[in-house]
Image (cartoon, rainbow, N blue to C red):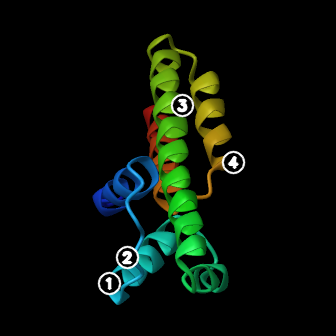
Amino acid sequence: MPTPMNWDDVRDLEHRVLKNGEALILTDELRDILRTRAAEVALPMTATEQSLQTEATARELLEEIARRIREGSVRLSRAMSRAYKHQQAGDMQAARRLLEGVLDVEVVPHYRDLAQVQLEALDDGE
């Protein structure tokens, strides 16, 4: 099973900066956080480094990181919930298609890993 991700720092930044309007101050620590989180959500390193040059572009980077985390989480949760219902009804093909659909569009490696584990569990259960 993939190791759980702790994206609380991004969620906190998103809340403070994007929702409450707090200024984004580019410190070395903040750059390191954004650099690490950007890699975790499969953003290219060159684009990330360019985004870390100004506060405005770093804010856009934060928005993209938060969006990928949020949308990937919702996509995976919905697919897993629906797949479970299909599995309980004995329709393994429908369950499999839902998880394969996540793998077709998901870019965040952590969410892809979770979907793959669930897909393999379906295959092992047959």
Residue shown at 62% from the left, 58% from the top:
107
Q: Quadrant of residue 23?
A: bottom left
**Mark nearer the N terminus (4 vs 1):** 1
Residue 11 location, x and y as percent? 35, 53
Give left or right: position of 32 versus 70.
left
Residue shown at 42% from the left, 77% from the top:
36
Image: 74 above or below 46: above
Give the labeled residue for mark 4. Answer: 105
**Front tag of 3 and 2:** 2
Give the labeled residue for mark 2. Answer: 33
**Front tag of 3 and 1:** 1
Q: Are discs 4 and 3 less than 8 Å apart at CB?
A: no
Residue shown at 58% from the left, 17% from the top:
91
Tell me the distance, in whole angstroms, between the alpha carbons under discs 4 and 3: 12 Å
Q: Residues within 10 Å of mark 4 (few under 14, many from 20)?
A: few
Residue 58 location, x and y as percent? 54, 73
Q: Amino acid at mark 3?
A: Ala
Residue shown at 64% from the left, 85% from the top:
50
**Mark nearer the N terminus (4 vs 2):** 2
**Mark nearer the N terminus (3 vs 1):** 1
Q: Amino acid at mark 2?
A: Ile
Tell me the distance, in whole angstroms, between the alpha carbons under discs 4 and 2: 25 Å
Give the labeled residue for mark 1. Answer: 29
Frontmost residue, 90 versus 36: 36
Q: Residues within 10 Å of mark 3 (few under 14, many from 20)?
A: many
Image: 91 above or below 45: above
Quarter containing the N terminus:
bottom left
Badge number at residue 106: none
Q: Are discs 2 and 1 less than 8 Å apart at CB?
A: yes
Tell me the distance, in whole angstroms, between the alpha carbons under discs 3 and 1: 35 Å
At mark 1, the secondary structure is: helix
**Mark nearer the N terminus (3 vs 2):** 2
